[in-house]
Amino acid sequence: MTLGLSVDEVLTTTRTVRKRLDVTKPVSREVLEECLEIALQAPNGSNLNRWRWIIVDDPQMVARVAGEYRKAVNWSPDGPGGSDETGNAAAIYKRVERGEKILESSNALAEKFDAMPAIVVPLMRGRTDGLDVFNQSAMWGSIYPAVWSFCLAARERGLGTAWTTASCMREREVCEVLGIPMEKFTHIGLLPVAYYEGDSFREAWRKPLSEVLTWNSFEG
């Protein structure tokens, strides 16, 4: 079943959903495969279709993947965690617009990650290590459009997603859990998927176009 949203509504209200993900409702494989079929229509370099996808829905496997995610963000049931180059995610979030709310939301996601009905794991074939900008751009540009298309397709079906790359800090461990050959594929993040609580979503705060756009040459 789809919501019948317009293209503009899907594009402007597909949010990163963390706190409102409802882990009590199952998500069928049929609807997940439907979203992925749509995602695979996204453009990719030379139409080589070099991506691979894993959908984790076995509760024990979900818990194992969630364990690596929690280690990556230093989550603790006793309070907020976080990891970055300073070891203090909270300090970084304080420097960003609405940072404290994002930190609170991220911790809410970590808390229930192990109960997710499904986690989508996109894989990029090859490694970017040592590649020039052209080749790196071609690789990333051949997987991210499909990831976003999956999120849009899920939104139209009443599902929430949260694209998180924190697990990349434990890429080797995640790959070991899922049996991914790291010499052939790059783990680029996780997409927990669940139905969401509440009715809908609003447009998010963004800087006005006048602050980020210039014509014909760079200014700033």
Image (tube, grey):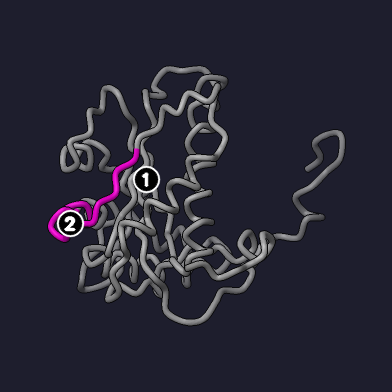
Query: What kind of residue is marked 2?
Result: Asp
Quickly name the residue at label 1: 189
Q: Secondary structure at mark 2?
A: loop
Residue at 66% from the left image edge and 59% from the top image edge: 7
Q: Nearer the viewer, residue 194 or 1?
A: 1
Of all residues, the one furthest to the bottom in this rendering is 198
* Residue 79, percent from left and from top: 26, 72
* Residue 193, percent from left and from top: 36, 61
In three-dimensional space, the C-alpha distance between marks 2 and 1, rounded to whole angstroms, equals 18 Å
Judge whether residue 57 is colored magenta. yes
- Residue 162 lies in what quarter of the image? bottom left
Q: Which residues are magenta?
A: 53-67
Magenta stretch: dominant SS? Answer: helix
Mark 2 vs mark 1: in front: 2
Query: Is residue 57 toward the left or the right of residue 207 in the image?
Result: left
Is residue 196 placed above or below 96 in the rendered structure? below
Check residue 93 in the rendering and tell me which mark sits there, or answer none: none
Is residue 140 placed above or below 130 in the rendered structure? below
Q: Nearer the viewer, residue 102 or 162?
A: 162
The image quadrant where one finds the C terminus is: top right
* Residue 26, percent from left and from top: 28, 69
